[in-house]
């Protein structure tokens, strides 16, 4: 069967500011603490979603008036390991590449002020700044999907396939307008990297002989097909589930749909293993 690695280039995705002047040493001392707390603090007062459509939730309420710079800067800092800190000049040039140095610096100061207002108004901290740098410093009650996924990738936590299928809501900064070319190149690279990690992790939940039930394997398979419609192994899991329930019309529908997608979009037929599975399942009808 075709794996995600075989089709990686064909993946298709369906579809708060602390006080200025916080000392860098304080950030360094606190870093390990917040990294250990991110997935254990419950309930979370503030949720920052950067995977899929970006949003800020405070309690159960969707925060309004959150500037795009909040989401972009947060994502860039999170994915700037190991210290998750960037110089002001670097960020100004990245996000305002067509402005001269003075104008770009002024734009960043304005963004800092707006983000600080959002964080203070909603009672949380995600990013802190001093005169020369911006860095990540989430308060204990903040949850961010991208932080959780990046911790999994770095090996700080282990997320099971079902958790990954929930956390990975879609491509990074999905609803954000395009920016400068350097940022767009960085964003495209990170989107592909995160997608590959999510797909590979979710696929582990489909393997037979694991601790996951057939229903849980099917959850992983459905999510995987949303991310990569060419995954024959995911379709096979769903065909097996349908056959187990004696829904043979559904087995045929799944196979026919997959065959059509592969033929129309890739110009190939299902693998011999997939064809054999389909034949065996349909023979059970007789």
Image: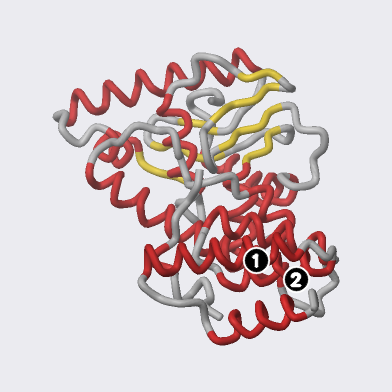
Judging depth in this view, the residue of 62 and 40 nearest the camera is 62
Q: Quadrant of the N terminus?
A: bottom right
Name the mark on residue 252: 1
Please state if 185 lies on the left or on the right of 29 as rendered: left
User: Label 2 belongs to which residue?
Assistant: 240
The image shows residue 282, relative to residue 153, as above or below, that is below
Instruction: Point out the frontmost of discs 2 and 1.
Output: 1
Q: Along the line of sight, which residue is nearer the eye, 117 or 185? A: 185
Asked whether 118 or 228 is in front, the reply is: 228
Rendering quarter of residue 173: top left
Disc marking residue 214 = none
Indicate the position of residue 145 as horizontal and vertical percent values. Answer: 62, 44
Measured in 3D between alpha carbons, the distance from the residue under mark 2 to the one under mark 1, in whole angstroms, is 11 Å
Helix, strand or loop for disc 2: helix
Q: Residues within 10 Å of mark 1 (few under 14, many from 20)?
A: some
- Residue 159 visible to an observer of this rendering: no
Q: Position of residue 114 (x, y in %)?
A: 44, 17
Q: Are marks 2 and 1 in contact (CB under 8 Å)?
A: no
Q: Is residue 232 above or below residue 163?
A: below
Residue 64 spot, x, y in % from top left: 55, 15
The residue sitting at 64% across, 17% down in the picture is 122
Q: Residue at x 59, y 16 (%)?
A: 120
Q: Which sits in the foreground, 245 or 81?
A: 245
Q: Is residue 92 visible?
A: yes
Give the residue drawn at x 66%, y 72%: 236
Colour pattern of the rendering: secondary structure
Label 2 Cα neighbours within 10 Å, binned few <14 / some 14-19 / many ≥20: some
Instruction: Give SS at disc 1.
Output: helix
Q: Indicate whether 117 appears above or below 245.
A: above
> Where residue 133 sits: x, y (%)?
41, 37
Q: Based on the displayed image, in which of its 4 quarters is residue 97 positioned?
A: top left
């Amino acid at each position: 069967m075709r794996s995600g690695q075989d089709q990686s280039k064909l993946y298709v995705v369906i579809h708060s500011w602390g006080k200025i002047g916080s000392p860098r040493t304080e950030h360094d001392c606190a870093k390990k603490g917040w990294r250990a707390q991110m997935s254990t603090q419950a309930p979370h007062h503030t949720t920052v979603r950067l995977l899929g459509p970006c949003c800020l939730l405070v309690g159960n309420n969707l925060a309004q008036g959150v500037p795009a710079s909040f989401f972009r800067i947060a994502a860039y800092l999170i994915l700037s390991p190991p210290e998750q800190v960037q110089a002001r000049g670097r960020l100004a040039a990245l996000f305002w590449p067509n402005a001269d140095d003075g104008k770009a610096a002024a734009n960043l100061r304005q963004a800092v002020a707006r983000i600080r207002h959002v964080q203070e108004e909603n009672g949380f901290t995600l990013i802190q700044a001093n005169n020369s740098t911006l860095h990540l410093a989430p308060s204990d009650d903040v949850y961010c999907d991208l932080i959780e996924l990046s911790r999994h990738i770095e090996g700080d936590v282990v997320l099971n396939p079902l958790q990954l299928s929930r956390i990975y809501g879609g491509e990074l900064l999905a609803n954000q307008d395009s920016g400068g070319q350097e940022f767009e190149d960085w964003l495209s690279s990170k989107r592909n990297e995160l997608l590959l990690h999510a797909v590979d992790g979710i696929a582990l939940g489909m393997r037979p002989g694991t601790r996951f039930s057939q229903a849980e394997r099917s959850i992983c398979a459905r999510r995987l097909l949303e991310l990569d419609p060419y995954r024959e192994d995911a379709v096979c899991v769903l065909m097996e589930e349908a056959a187990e329930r004696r829904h043979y019309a559904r087995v045929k529908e799944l196979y026919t749909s997959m065959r059509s997608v592969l033929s129309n979009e890739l110009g190939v037929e299902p693998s011999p293993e997939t064809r054999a599975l389909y034949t065996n399942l349909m023979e059970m009808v007789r």
